[in-house]
Amino acid sequence: INIGRNQSAIYYNGNKLNSFDAVLPRIGASQTSYGTAIVRQFEMMGDYCVNTSESIKSSRDKLRSLQILAKHGLDTPVTGYASHTMDIHDVIEKVGKTPLIMKLLQGTQGNGMVLAETIKAAESVMNAFKQVDADILVQEYGRYFNLKTVSFRGGCLTGENHSGAKLHGFLSFLIKSV
């Protein structure tokens, strides 16, 4: 990235990237900070980004995501938040009956998440989390929601090494809804 008055640019392999009609960010969780900086630069240069840098950052923050969904009236599991494990008993009580999902705020892709089937199991998890002095989310277990859900993982749908993105552009990222 080059930042300057009337000189802002993004370079890839030494070549300056020109303006794009649309940017489709695909950023791994371990690259959030760097990736959102690049997306912000595209935004500053006037390129349309399907996912804004702010939306990407919000989606990576479990608590913030839940706050946004609740603010807009979408149903979410009853969730409690504790900054330290000493607050956890009150949080467990306010969330309700077991089973409970207990999550470290920082975990991704299922890491740092435990299903506690009983209060005793929840207390054991809490004791384990005390060792890392972590922020914790406690949620009601979702099997009672009776929601039909599906998870899509898009990407290059036309071949290995993401060759389709170069050959077919946007079409490589389309997925058929079921």
Image: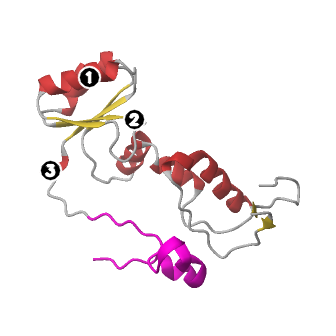
- Name of the residue lying farthest toward the front: 160
Residue drawn at point x = 58 percent, y = 83 percent: 167
Q: Which quarter of the rendered picture does the N terminus lie within? A: bottom right
Q: x%, y% of residue 100?
A: 19, 36
Quick check: marks 2 and 1 in contact, CB under 8 Å?
A: no
**In terms of secondary structure, where does tag 3 sit?**
helix
**In terms of secondary structure, where does tag 1 sit?**
helix
Q: Which quarter of the rendered picture does the C terminus lie within? A: bottom left
Horizontally, residue 119 falls left or right of residue 29, namely left
Q: Amino acid at mark 2?
A: Leu
Dividing the picture into quadrants, the one containing residue 21 is bottom right
- Residue for badge 3: 143
Q: Amino acid at mark 3?
A: Arg
Question: Which label sits on residue 126?
Answer: 1
Residue drawn at point x = 67 percent, y = 55 percent: 38
Q: x%, y% of residue 161?
A: 52, 71
- Name of the residue lying farthest toward the top: 86
> Mark 3 or 2 closer to N-term?
2
Q: Amino acid at mark 1?
A: Met
Q: Is residue 44 magenta?
A: no
Q: Is residue 169 magenta?
A: yes
Part of the protein shown in magenta: 150-178
Number of other residues with Cα within 10 Å of mark 1, as a class: few under 14, some 14 to 19, many 20 or more: many
Q: x%, y% of residue 23?
A: 61, 69
Q: x%, y% of residue 132?
A: 39, 21
Give me the C-alpha separation between circle 3 and circle 1. 22 Å
Residue drawn at point x = 51 percent, y = 53 percent: 28
- Residue for badge 2: 105
Residue drawn at point x = 55 percent, y = 67 percent: 50
> Mark 3 or 1 closer to N-term?
1
